[in-house]
Image (cartoon, grey):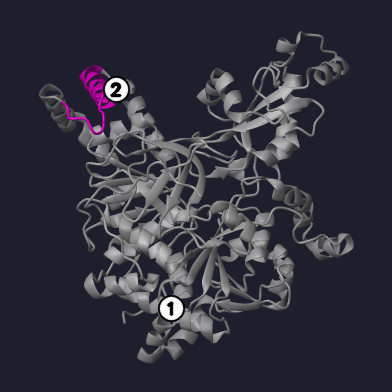
Amino acid sequence: MFLPPQIYRAPAHVGTVSLGRTLPSLLDEACDRNPNTQAFNQWTPKGWQPLSNQAFRSTAEELALGLQAIGLQAGDRVALFMHSDTYFCIADMGCLLAKLVNVPISLGEVPENIVLILQHSGATALILSDRALLAQIAPCLGEVNSLKTLILIDALSAGQENLSEADRDRWGLPSHLQFWSWAELAAKGAANRSPLTVRALRDQIAADDLATIIYVAAATGRCQDLRSSLLPMFRMVKTIREHLQKHKSPQYVCETPKGVMLTHENLSADALAAFSEIPDLKRGPQEVILSFLPLTHIFARVLLYGHINYGHTIHFSTPTRVIKHLREVQPTVFATVPRLLEKVAQKISEKSHHLSGFSRWVSIWALGLAQRYELGQHPDWGYSWQLKLADWLVFKQWRLALGGRLRYLLTGGAALKADLANLFAAAGMPILQGYGLTQTSAVICVNRGQYNRAGTVGPPIAGVEMAIAADGEILVKAPYVMKGYYHNPTATQEAIDEEGWFHTGDVGEFTTEGFLKLTGYKKSLFKLSTGKYVTPEPLERHVMQSPLVEYAIAIGAGQRFCAMLIFPNRHKLQAKARTLGLQQPLPTLLQDPQIQALYQDLVEAANQSLPDWSRAKKFQLVHAELTVNNGLLLANHQIQREQVQERFAEVIEQLYAEAPPVARPTRQLPPQTPELPPLQVEAA
């Protein structure tokens, strides 16, 4: 039995816990108390396309009834392969109203992973935003035996609502898949919609019903072996089935995928508790939100449910347009990842140093003043006066670059540097840095109001109990913790112990004031500053297959991209060098363009089977040995990751000091939301 020496909770009299709620009830409350004629705003090339929260509700109800009309049953899994926009929100809420379990799939996933998720979840239906996304994965769908139905939002072409045989052949779609357009489902739902059927939708849902399954990266990369071996088959579209039949490839020869099961109560309670912690957050349309983070991720998803309940005005942007839209929309609430804030701070610094004369002097003075600021400390009179002057001269211009009305700057998904938190706070834009995992329904800690300290992720929110295990691992108990991993009882038992503590896999400590500081990861999985997780083993294993490599380690925790340190096999390398006519000493040899090219080819070959964020954008050949005696290897010759990164910290710093090389073209899904058909709806 684990008896923690100390349990950490939220500060007294801060935040509230609201249990027993379904997610549709959050929408109903907003429609009744805070009707908003422009609650959802979809960006299109023709401008913003608004939708009221009441019209949103009626559209979601029609979708739910339409899904039921085509034969989907309560508990069926529906995969969402969609852009993060109003349509995603409607599809999500429609599934929830129909008592279906949605399975969001990131647009950045490679086809092999998509098939794995569809297979493991047993998805019976798949909703896609457009034809481009369908074309990306259509050749793979025949390998998913459970999949029966495809639903496409945009029309195939003018006047065409269904797939022809020519379309099926062109995309390689199996003949048994039933196809429905969004318009057809909406029409079926509208025909069945009545006060009685709408009430029946809500009566069938309970707070402890499963709402979603979100697949997360495994702590080991063993599944990647199978995915890499399957990659050539996915490129050979016309022979996928024949290849599988010939080789009798098993569905799983690897670690079972981890699908996080979250209930209505998990998500609704976490959203309401987190929002209750934000000081003076208003209900109603006056709070304007700019959303660009992927709704397939838990952070943006839980924020969405909170904004829906509060009746806020939400604008959906894209990563390529978000800076422009910040100035255009002028949000009061903006959630982002640390990487974007790093870019903003860098631009501020560069602009300050490129000015001339008095403007340059004032800007650099204000920048230095902001860099001295410390959250949680009360500045003396002189410093306070200087901050006010700097605000009038400089800081207000910084705020205008982000729209000029920001009241809350939310960030999570990756570590935020303390100096950035202090810099933005000094300029009147305090950052609410939070911490949480998919398994905890997102937020379990957050900096807010007077409880805000740079370099930490804040104290727990209401309803959360936290402890630190003997090995430093962060443990959590809360009504927001997942039910478990879908069809993976072994992983569930490993994650949630007999006492109900969820083991996060993160390492941290609490300050004397009760603020959580993240200090590392218990396992090898690491997170980029973009919020993406990287499983290093597949990349490392592929590179280390070469006789030219003794060891390789993927790095990038808190950085903007993944990179590698490669420790060459000196004997094999020198032998190879002689065949190339190279006779230099080893340190010089590592810098030779021909040798660099050899290792570049190794890295690029390893990158091919990985999602873009997991690919090594740069590498460094290191003239050093890793041994047990020098503390860089364990007794079983596994790499001591933390020790290696500490020993070669200067090498890593230099590696990230320069911009990464321009990436070669790779398989990418469209990053931007295309124009979609207008939402033809009427308020209930």
Q: Which residue is mark 2?
A: 355
Instruction: Determine if residue 127 is in view.
Output: no
How far from the left and from the top, in percent, is residue 311?
Answer: 27, 65
| Among numbered discs 1 and 2, the one appearing first in the sequence | 1
Q: Amino acid at mark 2?
A: Leu
Residue plotted at (28% across, 62% down): 312
Say which quarter of the image contains residue 680: bottom left
Q: Which residue is mark 1?
A: 205
Marks 1,2: beta carbons within 8 A = no
* Structural distance between the alpha carbons of marks 1 and 2: 60 Å
Q: Nearer the viewer, mark 1 or mark 2?
A: 1
Residue 579 image label: none
Residue plotted at (41% across, 62% down): 267
Q: Which quadrant is home to the C terminus?
A: bottom left
| SS of the residue under disc 1 | loop
| Left or right: 653, with 324 as reference point | right
Q: Using the image as rendered, state which of residue 212 and residue 65 is in the foreground.
A: 212
Segment colored magenta: 357-379
Q: Is residue 228 magenta?
A: no
